[in-house]
Amino acid sequence: MVSRAPRPTNQVALTIDDGYCAPCVDGYVAFAERSGIPLTFSPNGRFHELWAPHAAALRPLIAAGQIQIGNHTWSHPDMRHLNDTGVRIEIERNDDWIQKTFGITARPYFRPPYGMHDHRIDDLAGSLGYTTILMWNGTLGDATLETPADILGLAERWVRAGAIVLGHANHPTVLGLFDQLDALLAQRNLRPVTLDTMLGTSRAHG
Ligand SMILES: [Zn+2]
């Protein structure tokens, strides 16, 4: 399990989950394209119609290592309530979709919905090649609707050296704040990176 950088660093990993709001997915992808900032998306395949229009734009960014994809399950259940078969299906179905859409596996990073997991789920994920449970130690709090001031306050608190920060492509509030987030990174001399970079995971592309 990983929830922060393994060693002192000025790196910060921005990880963006779910993606059930079309303008939010559009906005995050556009932000990545124009800023060059590395992001790790962990989308749910059930929102495939919102991600599909961006597959062509994301593939080269993924190949270049600017964008990384994590597995956050197909339909975002609390995995503790599923039997073993159900857990496997959620992970494998999403991995199949990720491979088909983005041309890459999300292995070894599994982000459990709501951060809810236990030894059984970790073992099942591990048996499917998802050997790293991806948690976080900072949040933009935007899984639910927030004001811009709330999000910026949380960003000021949590976007720090070595942090893995959780955000969501679910509510458009964050879209107006990208310039401020960008400024915060610069002001704190932080280097945004993907999880692969932060954790030194090598990845074959093709
Ligand atoms: Zn989620």
Image (cartoon, rainbow, N blue to C red):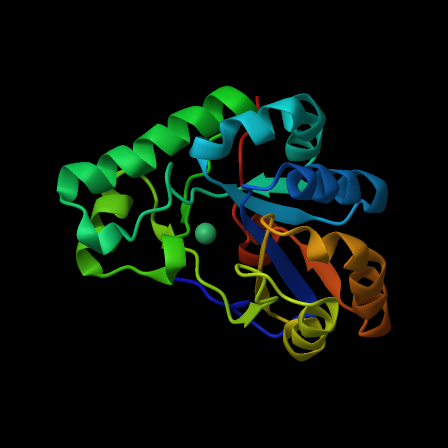
| Residue 160: % across, % down | 67, 74
Q: Say if residue 6 shows up in the picture.
A: yes
Determine if residue 103 is in view: no
Quarter-wise, where is residue 23 in the image? Answer: top right
Examine the rendered structure and indicate whether residue 110 appears above or below residue 135: above
Q: Could you tell whether 104 is left or right of 122 in the image?
A: right
The x and y percentages for residue 127 are 23, 41
Q: Residue 149 at what x, y percent from top left?
A: 74, 73
Residue drawn at the location 47% of the way across and 25% of the way down: 99
Which quadrant would residue 129 be assigned to in this image? top left
Q: What count of labels does the image hold? A: 0
Q: Nearer the viewer, residue 116 or 132?
A: 116
Tell me: residue 73, above or below residue 132: above
Could you say which quadrant of the image residue 51 lies in? Answer: top right
Quarter containing the N terminus: bottom left
At x 21% / y 55%, what residue is drawn? 80
What residue is shown at x 66% (from left), y 27% (from top)? 54
Image quadrant occupied by the C terminus: top right
Query: Would residue 196 appear left or right of 90 to someone viewing this image?
Result: right
Q: x%, y% of residue 200?
A: 55, 52
